[in-house]
Amino acid sequence: MQRNPETSPDAARRHILRAGAAGLLAAAMPGARALSQPAWPAQPVNYVVPFPPGGLTDVAARTVAKALGDAHHWNVVIENKPGGNANIGAAFVARAPADGHTWLAITLSHAANATLFQGKAGYDLLGDLTALAGLASSSMMVVVNAKSPIKSMDALRKAATSGTLSAASSGNGTPPHLTLALYQKLTGARLMHVPYKGGAPSLTDLIGGHVDVIFSNYPESLAHVQSGALRALAVTTRQRSPELPDVPTVAEAGMPDLIVENFTGVMVPAGTPEAVVRQAGEAIAAEMRKPGMQQTMAKLGFIPQPRGPAEFGRYVRDEVQRWRRIIQEAGIQTA
């Protein structure tokens, strides 16, 4: 019988020797294996922001993109894809090639959308996307009209449980609405929810005396508090705001479970190579830890919270679970 040269014992020995030699080369030259793999990034990175230009998430993304360009010479290009309660841009990234060249800016809205739009969003946040890095968060701020008799969180609780107060928000399922729902769960109060199409019109009506309170995005209401048009009762972070040092935290006001972080971070399509996730995620977190970047983010109204891929992944999962319970218990719907 003629022996197949490729299956003979000699061929097997040659295969083992080649494999052993390759292993020795890799051990002796750590860069040898990397040379055989395509360099990343091999093209511009498309950083998708699922909100309009000029908003907080957009500004944060552009700040990070510039820092990465300056430090690593990466070409990170911002693309705004707003609409669908931030689901259109997220679905676009979830369907993109899993090569590390498409990023998604996510926020608390996406953690809530995992429940609010379950089966209808066009993507699965935890199944179709992978955490890359956490950037920062911004506080929510409980604000009333400056002429309101409500001057503390305790006074708000008493007014909310003894009468009918109206609470505006920037829309159903938005962070202000979610914070209101959590407040009602913790206090047993029932405020009349008045959803608006955005934070600006809701604040205009609060200043005009048409609604009683807003659990507002901090950066949206800060200028109105500083001007004296609104009174801040508390911020929902663990530390007081440097811009408003006299405003207590919710914990100081007796409501430690009302801590809410409107976070922002970066995710990529599931299946993106682990080496790319690690390289990009750790680079982003490293930029966020730099003092200059932390000062810049603080001026924008953010609390820097640099997190690498694994830590940010755990954080997002925890936020999805936390808000699922709140949304279900409160019966929140998007329409």
Image (cartoon, rainbow, N blue to C red):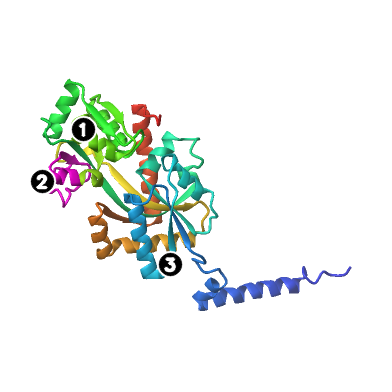
Task: From this view, report whether residue 200 is shown above or below residue 264.
Answer: above
Q: Residue at x 25, y 30 (%)?
A: 167
First of labels 2, 1 by sequence position: 1
Read off the residue under disc 1: 213
Q: Is residue 173 left or right of residue 254?
A: right
Q: Amino acid at mark 2?
A: Asp
Graded by Cα atoms within 10 Å as few (under 14), some (14 to 19) or many (20 or more), the crowding at tag 1 reads many
Q: Residue at x 29, y 34 (%)?
A: 169
Q: Position of residue 317 (x, y in %)?
A: 40, 44
Residue on which disc 2 sits: 246
Q: Which mark is residue 74?
A: 3
Q: Residues within 10 Å of mark 2 (few under 14, many from 20)?
A: few
Name the secondary structure under disc 3: loop
In primary-sequence order, the first of circles 3 and 2 is: 3
Residue visible at 28% across and 62% down in the picture:
293
Amino acid type at circle 3 is Trp
- Three-letter code for the amino acid on which mark 1 is drawn: Val
Neighbourhood count class around disc 3 (C-alpha, 10 Å): few under 14, some 14–19, many 20 upward:
some
Q: Is residue 240 magenta?
A: yes
Q: Which residues are magenta?
A: 223-250
Q: Nearer the viewer, mark 1 or mark 3?
A: 1
Q: Nearer the viewer, residue 188 or 19?
A: 188
- Marks 1 and 3, how far apart at CA: 44 Å
Q: Quadrant of the C terminus?
A: top left
Question: Observer-nearest residue: 270 or 299?
Answer: 299
